[in-house]
Image (tube, grey):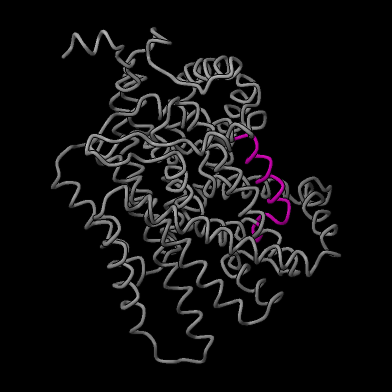
Amino acid sequence: MEALNDAIVALNDTFWLYLIIPVLAVLSLYFTVRSGAVQIRMIPEMVRAMVGKAEVAEDGKKAISSFQAFAISAAARIGTGNIAGVATAIALGGPGAVFWMWIMGLVVGAASFVESTLAQLYKVRDKSGFRGGPAYYMLHGLRAKWMGVLFAVVITVTFGFVFNAVQSNTIVGAIMTSVEATGATGMGWLEPVLGLALVAVTAAVIFGGVRRIAHVAQLLVPFMAGLYMILGLIIVVLNIDALPAVFGQIFASAFGFEEIAAGGVGAAIVQGVRRGMFSNEAGLGSAPNAGATASVSHPVKQGLVQTLGVYVDTLLVCSTTAFIVLLSNPTYGENRGPTLTQEALQFNLGNWSLHLLTLIILLVAFTSVLGNYFYGESNVGFLTRNRAVMTGYRWVVLVVTFLGAIGSSDLVWNLADTTMGIMALVNLAAIAPLSAIAFKLLKDYNEQRKQGLDPVFTRDRLPELTGVECWEPKATEPEKASAS
């Protein structure tokens, strides 16, 4: 098993360094130029677009709002990757990994805009509102059903199964660490009990459908992110005199001559980009599945909102972890990533913070389970409309969640890196040719804003588009009368 794990690690390093990172960087820079740096220029629009009201769905209830769709994607984004993943990047790539995480977070925002705008355009209706994502724009935009099927299978395995096993393992591990810190012994029975409790709570939410997931995410995501950032702010204030030195470490490690000679800059870039992408998911093709559910008046609105999610994740939450770790004078090592944040909090705030971090990990990992489940659900729905298959998928998610709680996660994490990379390549191959459509939509949006309008899109505004199932023009009064 150890030999298999080592082989997967070696494959991932080569796969990411020589293929995924260059493709992601080049395409993101291209999207940035073509869009006029939409991810930076239109930040005020991102905030404005988030407050729109949702329409009524076919079942008579409110469809998913722009903010709720943002919360679903944030639930999946803001997870253990922000806490353990960033610390791992620092442990393996040094402080310079933080700089490259920031840079890529800014650049890949353009890819996030493109993929989520396309997901909105090519979404389809269902009884609770809308459903969509990369598989749908591969089918309807590229007319490549095989590509959509491949993506749907890979994302379902990666998020629905693999990542959820990791999240449940993290939850149980954090709770066990807190229990052991109190001096308790002989608690081996607690892991399966915690696993069963997690399965029960997860089942209560996921069998309630996307609305219940959205409501839970809407409540928990702002709370958990805010609580974690408050902790980080307290640590920064307590160590304010050391903050310039920390920034010096970050920039020196990112560009320093010693690091170049030792190959450390390469490690910093790989770890910063890889863990940054795992955390913010820009270009990966996962967040568009949530973005497509939103009921908005123009596809660009949700493209902007989902781009804002990249900044919340990378520049706020991930940076919080980076400062917590670097302000504690950590000792680095290959196997120290997951424990660095925990030890850093204890170093700065005392033993009580260990238990508070356990609560935070519990919340972020649980909401990630819900977000990950939804990504799989959306793509199982693409593959088949059979309700029995969907029910079966839910039960498999619950079984995997339990197994993750009582198992080891090293091999699972490394397999996730591989499947995540495959996901990214398939998605980037789709949005590269379709990006021209996203930029036409952006032009239409900006033209309406210049006229002082709240942008509204109907497919007759771009009659050359094909494969668009929603966005039909609203009937005029004479047309309504003749129809009746």
Image quadrant in which you'd find residue 354: bottom right
Majority secondary structure in the magenta region: helix
Taking 324 as reference, is 276 left or right? Answer: left
Residue 91 sits inside the magenta stretch: yes
Residue at image position (25%, 41%) is 380
Image quadrant in which you'd find residue 167: bottom left
Q: Quadrant of the C terminus?
A: top left
Taking 193 as reference, is 418 left or right? Answer: right
Q: Quadrant of the N terminus?
A: bottom left
Part of the protein shown in magenta: 90-108
Residue at image position (59%, 70%) is 339
x then y, percent, for residue 398:
27, 61
Residue at image position (36%, 69%) is 405
Image quadrant in which you'd find residue 219: bottom left
x then y, percent, for residue 436:
50, 16
Instruction: Please tell me whether residue 72 is drawn above or below residue 356 in the rendered image.
Output: above
